[in-house]
Amino acid sequence: MTDLLTIRDLRIDGRAGNAWHQIVKGVDLTLKRGEILGLIGESGAGKSTLGLAAMGYTKDGCRISGGSIRFDGQELVGAPAETRRALRGKRIAYVAQSAAAAFNPAYRLITQYCEAPIRHGVMPRKQAEADAVQLYREMQLPNPEDIGFRYPHQVSGGQLQRAMVAMAMACRPDLIIFDEPTTALDVTTQIEVLATIRNIVRDHQAAAIYITHDLAVVAQMADRVKVLLRGEEVEEADTRSMLAAPREDYTKSLWAVRDFRRAPMPEPAKGSAPVLTLTGVSAGYGAKRVLDDVSLTIRRGRTVAVVGESGSGKSTAARVIMGLLPPQSGAVSFEGTALAPASRNRPKDLQRRMQMIHQMADTALNPRHRVREVIGRPLQFFLGLTGRAKEDRIRELLGQIELDPDTFIDRLPAELSGGQKQRVCIARALAAEPEFIICDEVTSALDQLVAEGILRLLDRLQREMGLTYMFITHDLATVRSIADEVVVMQNGRVIEQGPKEAMFAPPHHPYTELLLSSVPQMDPDWLTNLLAARRSARA
């Protein structure tokens, strides 16, 4: 079978100030139709840069300085811009990591789906809309006939990511670049999406580059795996060989990072008041109820993980707690004090004591504000710090999150890696000197080495500062790593809660069992066997 994509000695430079430095350093890559290549490596390894280069594209501030990129026999390096644009969206598609940042908030999902097939003359609008509904159904989106007529903000993060995968497949491209396409998905949804991606790539004899930090996902998806580090290839092998016996020490370190477990936090003193209590809370958007009679308690100094599928109500519960969404019924109290439904009606000191770290650092940071402004604003608003006192505290906070103040204080978000952005978001939350922090999927978009660093940082800060965390996540490996207690949600209700050790020990509630059985394993046959077992059980 002929090669669909051939990259030879590719070199890409990035600009820092007025100087250029090499970020991809002579990488080779070959891809055949029907083949999936997994690209793995830590943040800054050059994975996304290489994936975009396969489309003949580089981000602002980057340039191809040497090498060759041939797609279906056509050289893309030096090709006219019109030639490369004609391929993108039609024959080469890209699925971005952050769906929230990639969709236009002003247009409905189905309008954005139809854009590429109409513009490239693949099909007219009516046919494109019907095709969208079919792919939405394949992607296991709820109400596939109607969901396309919602705006991006009206669906959950996991649903939005699936809509993006469907949109990339609209023109049935020959090559698809998947850049961390399942990081925002819960484990049960991820299984269906991975199976759909794998089937479409092979059924249409397309090829795919699958960029991910999740080694267990790579094991299910890729025929071959290439490991990158600081823009250079570390090693490449077929997936089974790589999983069984990685040659290089760096690759072995990626395998080992999954074993992080923090020491348990001490039990709160008997009789101590809980930090946060939800009692019979129901909430929703318009006529749609998302939370249904939710009750939970979070005790001081503990980390309570809230888990469940996309759309189960995890983030909605966080919005109610923070006063961003008034409850329809029920009550929220903080340290025994009933909270006003809306944040603007809560005392400033109460707002200060409760902070939130959002899922997508890309969209949580103002792209025009430097790190100094991002961290300095809550210092001035909540604590009244100005001048030298504010500057000193900003530098102290950067030191706490393990970023060098002299290096990072005047950087813009675009000049930070994903892990560095998330650390800045943590510093912004800490600037208010809170007692309780909601961490909403704070590691879902990070590679495993960086994610482990963030978890270790949060653990250290909790022990040093006596913080209490509500940790929203769909990653059960993260739950095992950091939680003291677990709350399981489904369809807006709490169906199980208790200490972590009890939650992971059988017998389980059937839904909890479904979540646990859906966590990918480092076995290339795991997904195939699981899907076969579930089909057999339904028969």
Image (cartoon, rainbow, N blue to C red):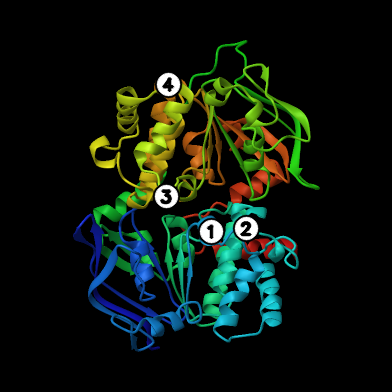
Between 364 and 159, the residue placed more toward the observer is 364
Name the front one of labels 2 and 1.
Answer: 2
Quadrant assignment, res 131:
bottom right
For the residue labelled by badge 4, is the local secondary structure a helix, a strand or a loop?
helix
Q: CA distance from mark 3 to mark 2?
A: 20 Å
Name the front one of labels 1 and 4.
Answer: 1
Residue sitting at the far front: 387
Given contact means CB atoms under 8 Å apart, are the residues at marks 2 and 1 in contact? yes
Does residue 71 show up?
Answer: yes
Measured from the top left, where is residue 331 in percent x and y? 74, 26
Amino acid marked by disc 4: Met
Q: Which residue is mark 3?
A: 367
Answer with left or right where residue 259 lies relative to residue 148.
left
Label drawn at residue 152 = 2
Q: Which residue is mark 4?
A: 465
For the residue labelled by badge 1, is the local secondary structure a helix, a strand or a loop?
helix
Upstream in sequence: badge 2 or badge 4: 2
Q: Residue at x 53, y 18 (%)?
A: 267
Between 300 and 160, the residue placed more toward the observer is 160
Q: CA distance from mark 2 to mark 1?
A: 9 Å
Upstream in sequence: badge 1 or badge 4: 1
Instruction: Give the quadrant of the C terminus.
Output: bottom right
